[in-house]
Amino acid sequence: MAEYKHLFFDLDHTLWDFETNAKISLTELFQEFSLDEKLNLGFEDFHSRYIHHNQVLWERYEKGFIRADELKWKRMWRTLLDFKNGDEGLAKDLSARYLEILPVQKNLFPYSNEILEYLLAKGYKIHLITNGFERTQWSKVRNSGLDKYISQLITSESSNSLKPEKEIFEYALRATGAELKESIMIGDNQAADIQGAINAGMDSVFVNHINAEVKVQPTFCITHLSELEGLL
């Protein structure tokens, strides 16, 4: 096994529990803007449509088809359109407020703190590589307490590239002073994290929280963060 020194984690869906935190944030948003009255619907319908549009537009953003500012408000706008409301101003207000509420949420995946403590104690340098927005991701890291473990946070905005492009990984290596052979990517997204690591020639760990079909070949595959203790 390679002697790794630098561990590059993904943030959302790997350490930071995006689904739980997003639902809490959307609940608060739904209530604050009285969307039940404006849209004449229940929260679960709003939540399911937002999650759908968010996923679709993130995929378009990661492929370079849309800009970050479009993603931020159009996911809300498309959700409103599903309920026959095309108010762009409301969509932009919802987007701005959501990006204030979401990053202060603190829910992590089980064993996140424990595994990071373990890895730090073993002398690893821990970094993050994320396609998320710079300000939002820093806020998530600080509010969830992950900042005490992290040496460097590499975002798509700071690197001017997106996973799975090899350039964001090359930027991360330069920013951290790491060598490729002593680095490994750890993430939940096969298309972004694992394929991105492959594109960069970096080893990888697929964190398969949901037992998804493995479509690309990581160096290692785990279903729970605690399994990293047996690998690193």
Image: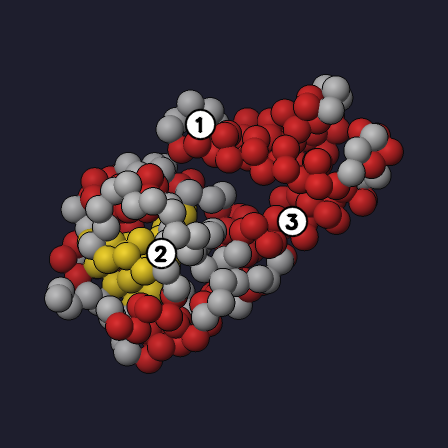
Q: Earlier in the sequence, mark 1 or mark 3?
A: 3
Residue 210 makes an appearance in the image? yes
Mark 1 is surrounded, within 10 Å at the Cα level, by few (under 14), some (14 to 19) or many (20 or more) other residues, namely some
On the rendered image, what quadrant is the N terminus found in? bottom left
Residue depth check, mark 2 versus mark 1: number of the one nearer the observer: 2
Say which element carries label 3: helix
Does 178 appear above or below 195?
A: below
Identity of the residue furthest to the bottom in this view: 121
State the image coordinates of residue 166 (x, y, percent, origin top left).
24, 40
Residue that label 2 marks: 207
Residue 82 is labelled as none
Q: In this orientation, which residue lies closer to the viewer: 84 or 141?
A: 84
Residue that label 3 marks: 23
Q: CA distance from mark 2 to mark 1?
A: 23 Å
Residue that label 1 marks: 60
Q: Three-letter amino acid code at disc 1?
A: Arg
Residue 121: image quadrant is: bottom left
